[in-house]
Image (cartoon, grey):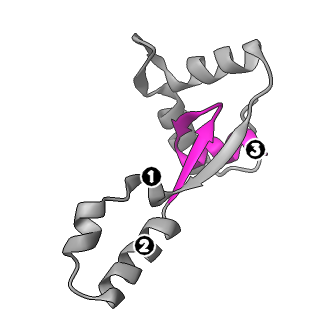
Amino acid sequence: MFNTEALSPMQAGRLNAALDRQYRFDGVVRSLRSHIEALAAAGRLELTEGDGMIDYSRARFNRLGSHRGQDAYVARLRAKRYFYVNGWAAPKLVYDAIRR
């Protein structure tokens, strides 16, 4: 499932560290690797990307003094990327390893 042939030993180590990290999923603590394997066993993995507009704060936007500052704030949020596996946030390294 996780394609690591094209990765250098350092990148493979970073990927394994990211996959072995413990998170809480629906009240159960388990590694990201076991959670993604469970999602894959339940069905096809859906990989999606999102921008940073989910972090938009109207109060922060309105506090900015100029239109230039407001435009820069929106541009920063749109440049930020989030990666999801079946709706669960995942690091980009894990997302790329699944996508290969």
- The residue at 46%/76% (across/down) is 75
| Residue type, label 3 | Arg
Residue 42 lies in what quarter of the image?
top right
Q: Position of residue 73 (x, y in %)?
A: 36, 74
**From mark 3 to mark 2, how far is it between C-alphas?**
28 Å
Q: Which residue lies under the disc numbered 2?
A: 74
Q: Nearer the viewer, residue 71 or 15?
A: 71
| Residue type, label 2 | Val
Magenta stretch, residue numbers: 81-100
**Callouts 3 and 2 close, C-beta under 8 Å:** no
Can you say whether 60 is above or below 98 in the image?
A: below
Q: Which residue lies under the disc numbered 1?
A: 54
Query: Which quadrant is home to the N terminus?
Result: top right
**From mark 1 to mark 3, how far is it between C-alphas?**
23 Å
- What SS does tag 1 mark? helix
Mark linked to residue 93: none
- What SS does tag 2 mark? helix
**From mark 2 to mark 1, how far is it between C-alphas?**
11 Å
Q: How many labels were placed on the picture?
A: 3
Q: Which residue lies under the disc numbered 3?
A: 99
Query: Which quadrant is home to the C terminus?
Result: top right
Q: Position of residue 96 (x, y in %)?
A: 67, 48
Nearer the viewer's eye, disc 3 or disc 2? 2
Indicate yes or no whether the magenta region holds residue 44. no
**First along the sequence among labels 2 and 1:** 1
Pointer 3 local density, CA inside 10 Å: few below 14, some 14–19, many at least 20: few
**First along the sequence among labels 1 and 3:** 1
- What SS does tag 3 mark? helix
